[in-house]
Amino acid sequence: MAHTKSAQKRIRQTEVRTERNRAAKSRIRTLRKKVAEAVTSGDKVAANTAVSALASAVDKAAKTNLIHSNKAANIKSKAAKALASAGA
């Protein structure tokens, strides 16, 4: 266990940030699944909304260096490609 006050604070900060990062990554995974479901169902409105929400979440994650900017671009590109191939 940490002995100094500063080390204890760092532990608390790490726990908060870890939880925040875990939630953001989980949200991205969920949104990717929603995009896939909307594209396969053929619902154009839902697919467009899902891709937009995914792009927003991915951009926010990349902005805070949670994921690399190239990975963000890859995720958005794959979502847009799936949307286009579905004819939406």
Image (tube, rainbow, N blue to C red):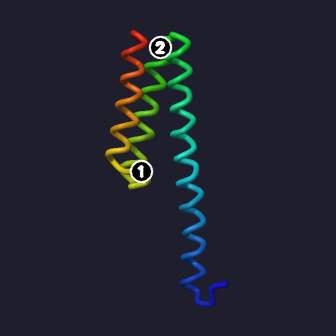
Furthest residue in direction bottom, as rendered:
3
**What is the x, y in percent for residue 51?**
43, 26
Tell me what residue is drawn at x 46 percent, y 31 percent. Answer: 53
Question: Which amino acid does the dot numbered 2 rest on?
Answer: Val
**What is the x, y in percent for residue 80?**
37, 24
Q: Earlier in the sequence, mark 2 or mark 1?
A: 2
Instruction: Please tell me in which quadrant of the rendered image residue 56 appears.
Output: top left
Q: Is residue 43 left or right of residue 15?
A: left
Tell me what residue is drawn at x 39 percent, y 29 percent. Answer: 78
Tell me what residue is drawn at x 33 percent, y 47 percent. Answer: 69
Secondary structure beneath disc 2?
helix
Report the quarter where the N terminus lies: bottom right
Which marked residue is nearer to the observer: mark 2 or mark 1?
A: 1
Instruction: Please tell me in which quadrant of the rendered image residue 19 appears.
Output: bottom right
Mark 2 surroundings within 10 Å by alpha-carbon count, few (fewer than 14), some (14 through 19), many (20 or more):
few
Tell me what residue is drawn at x 59 percent, y 89 percent. Answer: 4
Q: Viewer-proximal residue, 46 or 88?
A: 88
